[in-house]
């Protein structure tokens, strides 16, 4: 068995990794500089975040003024997602692999792992509080204003102008390709891009289509208001509320009646037991007692929507760690790194009754590092 499998495994790894290159979009677009810090499964990488530094007047004196203490925060990326995609090959299937034919099950196993990683990263978009668009309405259906408006959202959140990406689902891409600005040579679109139906860099974004764009299922919260006694000050992230109807889901977008800033709910609450709500970012404007909260179930609220994302590379951190490759009397284990996406796969083969069990696996983690560097383009 060992000699046969030793010949087969490199072929499976090489052919399988080609499938990863086709499917793994998001690992190419986010920040992966923290991978050198990755530890074993379950370990955490703490990413430091800067704190604000106040400006003060300079007054010459014999003694220097005291310097205010700084309280930088951290965001953790936990290496806790260990996924596998197993399948079986008969002796006949093994011969096909050696002849250069990749069995359907092997291809699907690789595709499943690639989609798992891609979907997880895309789902982190529920942590972004910046939004533009209308829930349930595909963007770019009339003009390019959705792109300019989501750009404005990022600009207002002080997102750097470089390394911005816009990832959309096939519906949004189809609408965008209907617009002259994205397919007409007179708008500076190259000939190859027109022939291939590609959207080249436009309006400060690199554009990508991804079939794995996620949908946020909003809660049904309606009729809530603040119950503060005294006003909540700027920076507050947890506010007392009166009882309304329905629940807020993690990732819901809300607004307060006295200002236009959008906030994302960070913990599910609702119903008779709801006494407070947690949000990001901290309040940008003080909020008083009895202020109406517009939730997903209220008129004008943001309900269930597709999570097309506009973001800077540094908005999301992604880490994958090579798994150990070794030989065992009852199995063979090898690993390989895809040179394009950098995703690390391990293939483990064990012999069972008259067949071989193949299992691709991957260990990874991801998290939003800076919420202000991303926004949702609703669909």
Image (tube, rainbow, N blue to C red):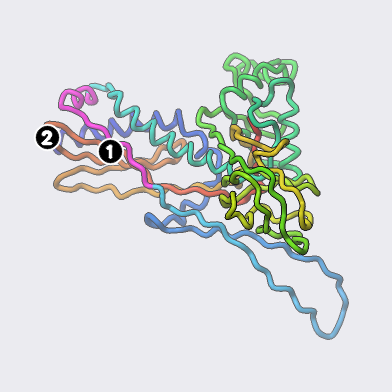
Q: Which x, y percent locates residue 274? A: 60, 54
- Residue at the image point whose x is 68% and y is 41% from the top: 162
Residue at the extreme front? 272
Q: Residue furthest bottom?
A: 62
Horizontally, is 110 left or right of 353 in the view? Answer: right
Give me the C-alpha separation between circle 2 and circle 1.
16 Å
Residue 158 seen by the camera: no
* Image quarter (top left, top right, bottom left or bottom right) of the N terminus: top left
**Front one among 329 and 304:** 304
**For numbered disc 2, what is the local secondary structure?**
loop
Question: Of the numbered discs in the image, which one, if any, rests on residue 353?
Answer: 2
Labels 2, 1: front one: 2
Q: In the rendered structure, does residue 367 fall within the stretch colored magenta?
A: no
Q: Residue at x 48, y 37 (%)?
A: 119
Question: Image height check: is 201 above or below 332?
Answer: above
Query: Of 140 and 195, which appears nearest the observer?
Result: 140
Relative depth, front residue between 357 and 3: 357
Where does the magenta region start and end? Answer: 82-98
Q: Look at 34% across and 27% down and name the residue there.
A: 107
Q: Earlier in the sequence, mark 2 or mark 1?
A: 2
Q: Could you tell me residue 295's position as x and y percent?
A: 67, 43
On the image, which quarter does residue 282 sit in? bottom right
Viewer can see residue 268: yes
> Which labelled disc corresponds to residue 359?
1
């Amino acid at each position: 068995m060992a000699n046969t499998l030793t010949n087969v495994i490199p072929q499976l790894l090489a052919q399988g990794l080609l499938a990863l290159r086709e499917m793994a979009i998001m690992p190419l677009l986010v920040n992966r500089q923290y991978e050198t810090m990755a530890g074993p499964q379950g370990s955490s990488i703490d990413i430091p975040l800067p704190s604000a530094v106040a400006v003060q007047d300079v007054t010459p004196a014999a003694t220097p003024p005291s310097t205010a203490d700084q309280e930088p925060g951290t965001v953790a990326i936990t290496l806790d997602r260990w996924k596998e995609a197993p399948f079986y090959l008969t002796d006949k299937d093994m011969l096909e692999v050696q002849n250069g034919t990749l069995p359907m099950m092997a291809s699907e196993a690789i595709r499943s792992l690639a989609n798992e990683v891609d979907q997880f990263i895309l789902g982190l978009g529920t942590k972004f509080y910046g939004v533009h668009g209308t829930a349930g309405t595909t963007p770019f259906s009339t003009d390019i204003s959705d792109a300019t408006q989501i750009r404005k959202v990022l600009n207002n959140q002080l997102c750097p102008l470089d390394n911005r990406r816009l990832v959309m689902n096939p519906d949004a891409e189809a609408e965008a390709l209907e617009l002259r600005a994205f397919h007409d040579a007179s708008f500076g679109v190259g000939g190859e891009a027109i022939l291939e139906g590609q959207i080249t860099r436009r309006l400060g974004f690199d554009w990508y289509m991804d079939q794995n764009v996620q949908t946020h299922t909003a809660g049904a919260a309606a009729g809530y208001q603040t119950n503060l006694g005294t006003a909540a000050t700027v920076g507050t992230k947890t506010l007392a509320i009166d009882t309304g109807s329905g629940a807020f889901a993690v990732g819901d977008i809300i607004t307060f009646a006295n200002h236009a800033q959008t906030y994302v709910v960070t913990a599910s609450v609702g119903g008779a037991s709801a006494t407070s709500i947690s949000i990001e970012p901290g309040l940008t404007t003080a909020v008083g007692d009895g202020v109406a909260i517009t939730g997903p179930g209220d008129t004008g609220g943001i309900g269930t929507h597709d999570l097309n994302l506009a973001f800077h590379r540094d908005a999301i951190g992604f880490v994958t760690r090579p798994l150990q490759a070794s030989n065992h009397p009852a199995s063979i284990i090898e690993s390989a790194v895809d040179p394009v996406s950098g995703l690390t796969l391990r293939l483990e083969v064990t012999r069972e009754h008259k067949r071989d069990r193949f299992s691709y696996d991957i260990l990874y983690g991801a998290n939003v590092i800076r919420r202000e560097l991303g926004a949702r383009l609703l669909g």
